[in-house]
Image (cartoon, rainbow, N blue to C red):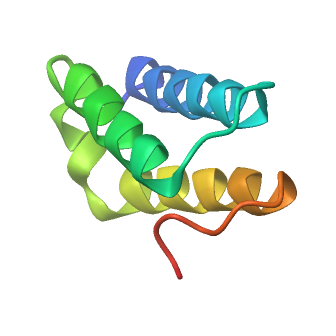
Amino acid sequence: MYTKGGDRACFNLVNRIKKKIQGKKRVTTDEIEELVYKEMDKVSKKHGEIYDTEPRSYIYEEVDAAMEEMGYQRVFYR
């Protein structure tokens, strides 16, 4: 992202979603996909560049890796 604040917001977004994936309650790919877009929308209020290619790719790759690690199907890069 363009700022340290934007980087931090992107990193925190990924960590929140990873915690959800790694929680005791099972999740679906649809739930996680919806959560990612909702969280990105929140971050975009202050950091519009969240929708640029690099941050979006980082988020998708990290979420997919967490999903696979927990035995789920990938959400974005199937």
Residue at horizontal 28 percent and vertical 23 percent from the top? 43
Q: Quadrant of the N terminus?
A: top left
Question: Which residue is at the far bottom?
Answer: 78
Counting from the top left corner in percent of width and height, residue 55 is at: 41, 50
Q: Pick whichever, 60 or 3, lies toward us.
A: 60
Horizontal side, residue 36 vs residue 59: left or right: left
Counting from the top left corner in percent of width and height, residue 53 is at: 32, 64
Residue at horizontal 56 percent and vertical 21 percent from the top? 12
Specify the quadrant of the image occupied by residue 69. bottom right
Could you tell me how many numbered marks the image carries?
Answer: 0
Horizontal side, residue 12 vs residue 49: left or right: right
Horizontal side, residue 30 vs residue 14: left or right: left
Residue at horizontal 47 percent and vertical 44 percent from the top? 32
Question: Which residue is at the far front?
Answer: 26
**Whether residue 40 is situated above or below residue 29 in the rendered picture:** above
**Whether residue 4 is situated above or below residue 33 in the rendered picture:** above
Counting from the top left corner in percent of width and height, residue 67 is at: 70, 55
Residue 1 seen in the figure: no
Q: Pick whichever, 56 or 5, lies toward us.
A: 56
Counting from the top left corner in percent of width and height, residue 38 is at: 27, 31
Residue 37 seen in the figure: yes
Residue at horizontal 39 percent and vertical 40 percent from the top? 36
Q: Pick whichever, 67 or 28, lies toward us.
A: 28
